[in-house]
């Protein structure tokens, strides 16, 4: 009997490497990718029941593609299920609507012999028995599908509306996020020094002089030598809670750039306070424009980031505004491959458009 890798993104490709090492016979389902051993037709119930095992990627919305419950009794494993079974490290899971990557990144800097895996760093299946401590950034998609939470230490940072398009309701999203509390030990805490002290059983005071390196694309300063104030690359802001966090960090006159797909949170209105003007560009600009409230919002429908920044360049000197916050507030959608690509594009354009 064959097995099936369901979805051929980053996790699916890690399943492929893992199964090849194990000598397990498999085929791959992905509707968008062609190639040897890849099927593009969604497996029906008969096909699913003929499989020895399904190796399931986290982003698959089973309720949407199998609305009649065809998948309900089908045996499957996630990459986390396998990692929990085979890895012997001390496993630390971090989840929350915002701040996961930063918390993981900072904890990694002070926890010796640790690795960053999951949504940050390498796929978990490429990281089995690699370090003494595994710091795993966990999304709601992963927590929804994993069978048992076999974490030594779980961290819940916060919960705000997100991925409602996938989970259906805020209540369901909240329930899934709270699965992190099934860990052997769990806490709601964001200070990496305190987390380190609880994991190591030592006083976190020994960490008082630590200066953390920050993540790229999270309130990252982009300097232009001629300009006094840096531009701020916050491309990692993929929801409104992250956007609001960024707005609260700004203390001078500035412009704001928004873009991305607004359907994830399914919000109707959102009031933006702080920036002098809000520039909205990209494929979803009209939808964002309708949903956000600000007295000076500028619609740049079907225009790109370069157009938005060129317009800002023309207005800046006369308006006396010397910095711009790029905090999109939404996932990339069709505009960019991911937040890294759009953040890199922003930094590139700062140099091209604002450096004489």
Image: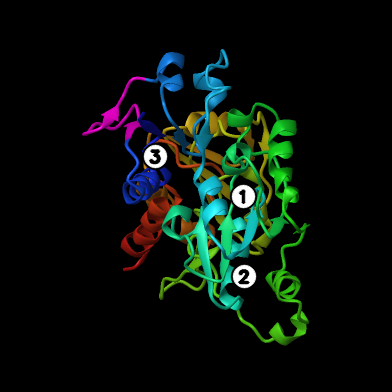
Instruction: Please tell me whether mark 2 sits on a helix, a strand or a loop.
Output: helix
Disc 1 element? helix
Badge 3 or badge 2: first in the primary sequence: 2
| Spot occupied by residue 17 in the image (x, y as percentages of width and height) | 34, 49
Q: Quadrant of residue 210?
A: bottom right
Left or right of residue 306, residue 98 in this image: right
Q: Which residue is mark 3?
A: 335
Give the number of the mark in front: 1 or 2. 2
Q: Residue 105 lies in magenta, yes or no?
A: no
- Check the image and name the residue furthest to the left: 36
Q: Label 1 neighbourhood size at 10 Å, few (<14), some (14-19), many (20+)?
A: many
Quick check: 290 above or below 155?
A: above
At horizontal 64% and vertical 39% (from top left) the residue drawn is 162
Which residue is tagged 1? 243
Q: Give me the C-alpha separation between circle 3 and circle 2.
A: 32 Å
Residue 107 tag number: 2
- The picture places residue 215, in percent across and down from the top left corner, at 52, 66
**Observer-nearest of 108 and 327:** 108
Q: Is residue 101 visible?
A: no
* Viewer-nearest residue: 321 or 12: 12
Quadrant placement of the N terminus:
top left
Instruction: Left or right? Give the position of 173 relative to 120.
Output: right
Secondary structure, mark 3, is loop
Residue at 68 percent of width and 36 percent of height: 173
104 shown above or below 330: below
Separation (CA) of disc 1 from disc 3:
18 Å
Q: Quadrant of the C terminus?
A: bottom left
- Do labels 1 and 2 touch, CB within 8 Å? no
- What is the magenta range? 26-41
The residue closer to the viewer here, 328 or 170, is 170
Would you call the spot at circle 3 few (<14 residues within 10 Å), some (14-19), or many (20 or more)? Answer: many
């Amino acid at each position: 009997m064959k097995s099936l890798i369901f979805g051929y993104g980053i996790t699916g490709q890690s399943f492929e490497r893992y199964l090849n090492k194990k000598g397990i016979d498999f085929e791959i389902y992905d509707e968008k990718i062609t190639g040897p051993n890849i099927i593009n037709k969604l497996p029906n119930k008969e096909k699913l029941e003929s499989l020895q095992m399904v190796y399931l990627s986290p982003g698959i919305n089973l309720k949407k593609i199998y609305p009649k419950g065809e998948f309900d009794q089908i045996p499957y494993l996630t990459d986390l299920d396998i990692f929990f079974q085979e890895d012997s490290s001390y496993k630390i899971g971090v989840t929350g609507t915002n701040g996961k990557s930063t918390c993981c990144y900072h904890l990694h800097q002070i926890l010796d012999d640790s690795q960053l895996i999951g949504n940050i760093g390498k796929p978990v299946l490429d990281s089995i028995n690699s370090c003494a401590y595994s710091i795993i950034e966990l999304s709601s998609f992963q927590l929804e599908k994993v069978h048992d939470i076999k974490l030594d230490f779980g961290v819940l940072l916060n919960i705000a509306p997100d991925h409602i398009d996938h989970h259906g309701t805020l209540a369901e999203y909240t329930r899934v996020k709270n699965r992190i509390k099934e860990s052997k030990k769990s806490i709601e805490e964001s200070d990496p020094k305190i987390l380190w002290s609880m994991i190591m059983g030592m006083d976190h005071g020994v960490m008082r002089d630590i200066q953390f390196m920050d993540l790229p694309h999270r309130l990252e300063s982009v300097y232009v030598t001629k300009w006094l104030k840096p531009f701020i690359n916050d491309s990692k802001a993929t929801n409104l809670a992250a956007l609001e966090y960024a707005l609260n960090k700004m203390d001078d006159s500035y412009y704001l750039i928004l873009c991305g797909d607004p359907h994830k949170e399914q919000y109707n209105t959102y009031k933006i306070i702080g920036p002098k003007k809000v520039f909205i560009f990209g494929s979803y600009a009209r939808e964002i424009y309708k949903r956000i409230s600000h007295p000076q919002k500028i619609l740049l429908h079907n225009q790109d980031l370069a157009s938005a920044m060129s317009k800002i360049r023309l207005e800046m000197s006369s308006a006396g505004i010397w910095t711009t916050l790029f905090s999109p507030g939404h996932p990339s959608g069709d505009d960019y491959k991911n937040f890294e690509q759009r953040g890199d594009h922003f930094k590139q354009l700062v140099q091209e458009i604002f450096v004489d």
